[in-house]
Each structure stands twice: as C-alpha cells, then as structure tokens.
Image: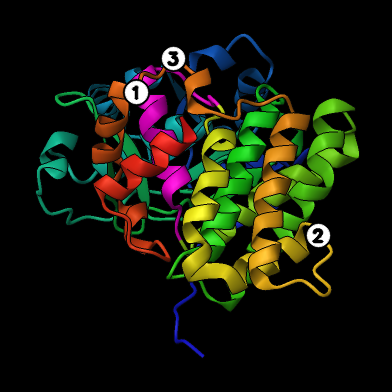
Amino acid sequence: MQVFDFFIPSHLKFGIDSLNRIGSVVSSVGNKVFLVTENELLSGKIISRIQTLLAERNCEVILYDIPAKIFSLNTNVIDKGALLARASYCDVIVGVGGMRTLSVAKAIAMLIKNTKSINDYIDGESIKEESIPYIEVPTESKNPFMFRNDFIITDVRTRKLCILKAINGQPCNVIYDPTVISDDNLSQIMMNNLANAIEGYLSTNSNFLSDMMFLKAIEMQAKYIVSAVKDKDSDSALFLSLSGLMTSLGLSMASIGIVGTVSEVIEQKMQSKNMGVASALLPYVIEFCIPSSAEKLARIGAAMGINVESKTMLDVAVKVIEFVKKLAEDLELPGKLSEFSIKTDDLIGIADSAVKIDGMNYLPRICNSEELYNILQLAF
C-alpha cells in the first residue's frame, strides 16, 4: 500500500441552512471582514443575508464585488483587492461565489502579508508568509481547489491561466450550504463534477481514501443527476451537492486531469463559465485512458450501476463511455466541441496551453501536446 499524507485543516460545515452559522464562524477568527464576491450575486439575498448575520456578531464588513466575466477575475483585480484589504486592516477574508471568485479571494488572503504584486509571484518570486484566515462559501458545487493551498487565476499580461500555491492557503472554514448552491447550468456543472471525480480516481496521486470518495461521488452523480436536472427533484439536488463536496474532498489528495484542465482553458478563451465542454470531452478522454486504467474504469462502471458480471474490464470500460454519452444526451448537453464557438484552428493552441497546467502532470497515461491535440480532434 502506498504511503500518503492526509491533512485538511479546513473546518467544514455542510447542510441545509448551515450559512446561518457564518456569524459565529467568522467572529471566532476575526471581526474585520473583507468580503469578496461576484457583483451578480448582489441582486439576490445571499450577500445581504451574510452581511446581516455578520453585523449581528459585531463584525465590520468591507464588500469587494468583482465582475462575473472570467477574464475580469485576473491579476489586476487581485492586486486591487489586496490593496483595499490591507488598507482596511482586515483580519479575515470571506469568499462567496463560484470557483474563480473564490480563487481571487484566496489570492487576496495570500497577498495581505506577501505584499508584492501577484504578477511577481507568477514570475517566480518566493511566497514567504502564510495567508491570513480565509473562509469560503461556495455558490457552485464545482471547485476542485476547495480544500487545497493552490488557486487558479488569469495572468492579465498573457491572458493565460496559471496556478499558484499559497502557504497554509486552504480555507480555515468552508460553509457548504446546498440552499445557496445555484441551480444555474446545473447539468453542465455536474457533468464537469463527474469528469473531475473520474479523472481524480484515475490520477496517479490518488489513494484508497480519495478513491472511496470519488467512487461514492460517481455513484451519486450517476443515480441522481437526471432526476435533479429534468425533474427538479430537491432530494436529488441535495445528493448532487454532497457528491460535489466529496469530489472536492477527493481532489484535496488527487488531481484534475485532461477534462478539468482543457475545460478551464476553453472557458478562459471563450470568456464564458460553465460551458459544459466536459460532455463533449469526457468520452474521448476515457477512451484514451483505457490502455492504462481498464481495471479502475471497470470499478467506475460498477459505481455507475453498470452490470459488470461476465464482462471483461475492456467491455465495462466501453460501457462507461456509452453511459457518459447517453447521460449527455439525456441532459441535452453537447456531444462534440464543434457545437461550441470553437474552431479547428483553436485546438492546437488549447492543447499547448492545457499541457502547461499542473493537472496534466498526474495523468494515468502520458499525454503531450500532440496527443492532446489528437484527443481534441476526435472530440471535435
């Protein structure tokens, strides 16, 4: 059995209306709060509710709302936020929103004591100081960086994605309330989560603990995603929220793979989030992984409820591909990259950018830029 380290310093609160605990959670850490969120959330009740709950605990709140467009969540936005946070003498950062917004919040928490521009750290400057306390409230169930030190941002100079690793940058608290998880683009997000769970399970740095989480997440996603999306069943949606959480927990030990990295690159390129490219990519990525991961794919098939009796591992792996394609069809998701505003001329650039992201370092089968380009061509 492999030796691995498992340490998640984040205190997790999960459950319906767990957001009501945010006042006690934040005030136990500090009372000068720098709240980072998306401006599109200001029209709803979540932010005003959080502000009220914090005020009841005598917390001072500085609100930093950022544009929802992906490219806007860039290094300039981070540097500006860090400057404002330092000027407010805040002692805790609270992030509320989707993965990119939470990455900005995590970056600001890192920059409070590391006072240079975020660009300096992208260029190789050493990060020397720990992040200040950071508390996370996700509004999407898609966040592979939730329990990790690292975060993904856009370098405004190059318009390229990059991943930085903070010192003790994980959230000290995560409040994961299914009632604040948005159901917008639920089918796309959950297909992405399914891809993350599958690729996390297949990654070379997975272990038996992350494997249990991934397989259970895959089981719940396969069982409940259609009823949650098509029938708007609230119980199914709750299980999907839990499956997203379990995938994030598993990814604190393992890693995203081809679908995860390529999805981020394409969404950055197209300036749109939750595009749902996972439905088009995942079958071809699974096919690519069959030579190295047939046994694990057979276990994935069993978790999906596929009848594996009297079938070879190869047969089950093929059934997994068929299951994913049928799921995309049932959810009315795109089956090819050509259904997006992507041109064939874009594919090589997407491949070149994706192979530079850390998630590509833990694939079960080596995949260079040319091989990834071939996968993208098949998916096109």
Please provide percent x and percent y for residue 334: 61, 25
Residue with the mark numbered 1: 344
* Picture layout, residue 18 above or below residue 53: below
Secondary structure category for the residue under label 2: loop
Q: CA distance from mark 1 to mark 2?
A: 35 Å
The residue drawn where x is 70% and y is 42% is: 21
Let me know if residue 144 appears in the view: yes
- Residue 109 vs residue 216, the one in the foreground: 216
Residue with the mark numbered 2: 306
Which one is earlier in the sequence, the residue at label 3 or at label 2? 2
Which one is earlier in the sequence, the residue at label 1 or at label 2? 2
Label 1 neighbourhood size at 10 Å, few (<14), some (14-19), many (20+)? few
The residue drawn where x is 58% and y is 17% is: 41
Classified by dominant secondary structure, the portion drawn in magenta counts as helix
Secondary structure category for the residue under label 3: loop
Residue 306 location, quadrant: bottom right
- Residue 58 vs residue 226, the one in the foreground: 226
Select label 1 or label 3 by which is in front.
Answer: 1
Residue with the mark numbered 3: 341
Magenta-colored span: 255-275
Toward the bottom, the furthest residue is 1
Q: How is the image coloured?
A: rainbow
Q: Dots 1 and 2: beta carbons under 8 Å?
A: no
Q: Is residue 305 left or right of residue 65?
A: right
- Residue 66 vs residue 357, the one in the foreground: 357
Q: Is residue 127 left or right of residue 161?
A: left
